[in-house]
Image (spheres, rainbow, N blue to C red):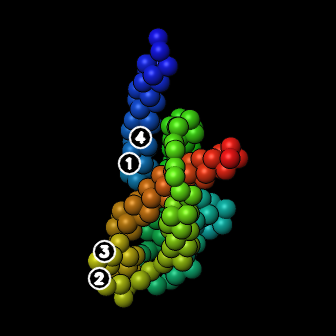
Amino acid sequence: MSNSEEDAQKMRWRGRATLAAFCLLVAASAMTWVVIPHLPTAYTCAFRDTPALRWLWPGNQATYNQISQWHGTLNDQCNLFSTRSMLSVFFATFSIFFYITSLSKAQITMKTGPVITTLVMAFMIVGLFSGGFNDQATGRGAWAAYHTTDSTNVLLWKTLPRMFAIYIFGPVWITHLRVAWLQQSSV
C-alpha cells in the first residue's frame, strides 16, 4: 500500500471519528439544554455563584456583571449560567479532540505568516470578554446582541455561534501558529 493510500484511509477514519464526536457534541448539548432547567436551583445556581464554575465560559463574566439589568428570574439566571458553562465544557472537549485527531497531523503549507488569523482571534477574544447586554444595538449585527428582554433560550441560542467560533477557530489558529513556527525553524 502506498503512502497516499494509507493517508486516505487515515483521513476517512479521522473524518468518521470527527463526525461521531460532533454528533455526540450535539446530543450532549441538547440533553444539557433540556435537563438543566429541571434540576434543583441549588445545583444550577452554583454555576452563577461560584466564580470557578462561572469561568467555564469566559463570556459569563460580562453577563454576570450586568445581570441586574436582565428581566429573568433567579431560576432563569441560574439556568443561563449553568447551561452556558456546561456547553462550553462540551465545546472545549470537542475542540481538543478536533485538534488532536485532525489538525495536529495535517500537512498545511502556508506562504504567509499567521497574522490574519491572529488578529481575528484577538478580536474574537476581546469581544467575548467585553460583551454584555446591548439594547441599543442596530444594524446587521443587532440580532446577535444580547438584549435585556431576551428569554433564557434566546440568550443561549445567541451564545452558540460565539462558542462555535471560539472553539473551532481556536484550533485552526493554533495550527497556523504551529505551521508558521515549523516553517521558520526549518529556514
Q: Residue reaching furthest top?
A: 1
Type of the residue with mark 1: Ala
Label 1, label 4: how far apart the Cα atoms are: 12 Å
Secondary-structure class at tag 3: helix
Foreground mark, 1 or 4? 4
Q: Which of the marked residues, 4 or 2, is nearer the chain's N terminus?
A: 4
Q: Which residue in the protein does label 1 denote?
A: 30
For disc 4, the marked residue is 22
- Quick check: can you spot residue 2? yes
Pick the front one: 35 or 172: 172
- Of the numbered discs 2 and 1, the one sitting upstream in the chain is 1
* Mark 1 Cα shell of 10 Å, populated few (<14), some (14-19), many (≥20): few
Residue 143 lies, in percent from the top left, at 30, 74
Helix, strand or loop status at disc 4: helix
Asked which secondary structure carries label 2, the reply is loop
Nearer mark to the viewer, of 1 and 3: 3
Circle 3 packing at 10 Å, graded few (<14), some (14-19), many (20+), is few
- Where residue 135 sits, quadrant-wise, is bottom left
Q: Which residue is mark 3?
A: 143
Pointer 2: what residue?
A: 139
Q: Is residue 140 above or below residue 124?
A: below
**Which of the two discs, 4 and 2, sits closer to the camera?**
2
